[in-house]
Image: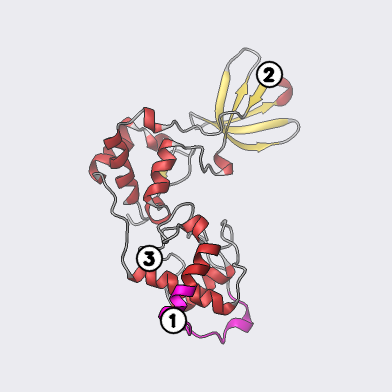
Amino acid sequence: MVGGWFLALAAPAWTQGRPERNPFDTPQDVELGGRLFQTHCSYCHGAQGEGGRGADLATGRYRQGGSDSELFRTIRYGIPGSEMGPVRATDDEVWRMVAFVKRLGAAEVEEKVPGDPAAGALVYQKKGACSTCHRIHEEGGNLGPEITEIGRIRGRKFLEESLLQPEADLPFNYRGVRVVLPSGQTVAGIRLNEDDISIQLRDTADNLRSFLKDNVKQIRRDQPSLMPAYGSVLTRKEIEDLVAYLSTLRGAK
């Protein structure tokens, strides 16, 4: 289960008689749901729903809706346009996963993130220069993913790893290429489109560029992340402050 900003797939007509309240909500159901969660969901959402590649489920806030029936629909049918597809489980098993997810939210186990968010905001704007590539609401660049809601959909561990090892989980559409021209000049950016004849990219100055392959010396893909590894750029405290700031980004202005 991943993401949260796309509309959930509407349930087919034959599911409309499904109950609004979870019929499998005993402590035993929660325990079984936890086991199913580890099998189907933990790879993206973490063993305790703390987030990672997928949304942080431990906060009790769900973009697709938090009622029993809404959580059932999200788990059962997935989220179109995202990496989260329909789960391969029976309806009874899905209800038990719903019970486990609801219990995570009710426990209010939201991560305690070390660091100072205010200091992290300064690192973001100045020393890290993150806004050059990332957008928050309408401000920032386009070379990296938008992060307006990053604190809601990603946990602290994932955020820190993204700063220290940005290539660890890099979205395919943000992988960098470097076009080497016959003069030796190198133009770096993210690939927008490519065919046998040409390649189009957005360069690091946010300009759209197009090159005929017959007119380039080499196209390099050996450094897929344009983002530096900040472990060698920022101090440990600055990393913690920056993660604390990113964790506050939950979509609301």
- Which of discs 3 and 2 lies nearer the camera? The answer is 3
Q: Is residue 30 magenta?
A: yes
Q: Give the residue at mark 3.
A: 61
Q: Is residue 120 visible?
A: yes
Magenta stretch bounds: 11-32
- Sequence-wise, the earlier of marks 3 and 1 is 1
Coloration of the structure image? secondary structure
Can you say which quadrant of the picture contains the C terminus? bottom left
Q: Residue at x 55, y 63 (%)?
A: 39
* Alpha-carbon span between mark 3 and mark 2: 50 Å
Disc 2 element: loop
Picture quarter containing residue 198?
top right
Q: Give the residue at mark 1.
A: 25
- Sequence-wise, the earlier of marks 3 and 2 is 3
* Alpha-carbon span between mark 3 and mark 1: 19 Å
Figure check: 208 above or below 15: above
**Label 3 Cα crowd, 10 Å radius (few <14 / some 14-19 / many 20+):** some
Figure check: 144 above or below 21: above
Picture quarter containing residue 120?
top left
* Alpha-carbon span between mark 2 and mark 1: 63 Å
Figure check: 9 above or below 42: below
- Which of discs 3 and 1 lies nearer the camera? The answer is 1
Residue 187 percent location from the top left of the image: 57, 23
Callout 2, which amino acid? Lys
Callout 1, which amino acid? Asp
Disc 1 element: loop
Q: Give the residue at mark 2.
A: 217
Identify which residue, 134 or 165, lies in the foreground.
165
Picture quarter containing residue 106?
bottom left
Identify which residue, 182 or 91, lies in the foreground.
91
- Sequence-wise, the earlier of marks 2 and 1 is 1
Callout 3, which amino acid? Arg
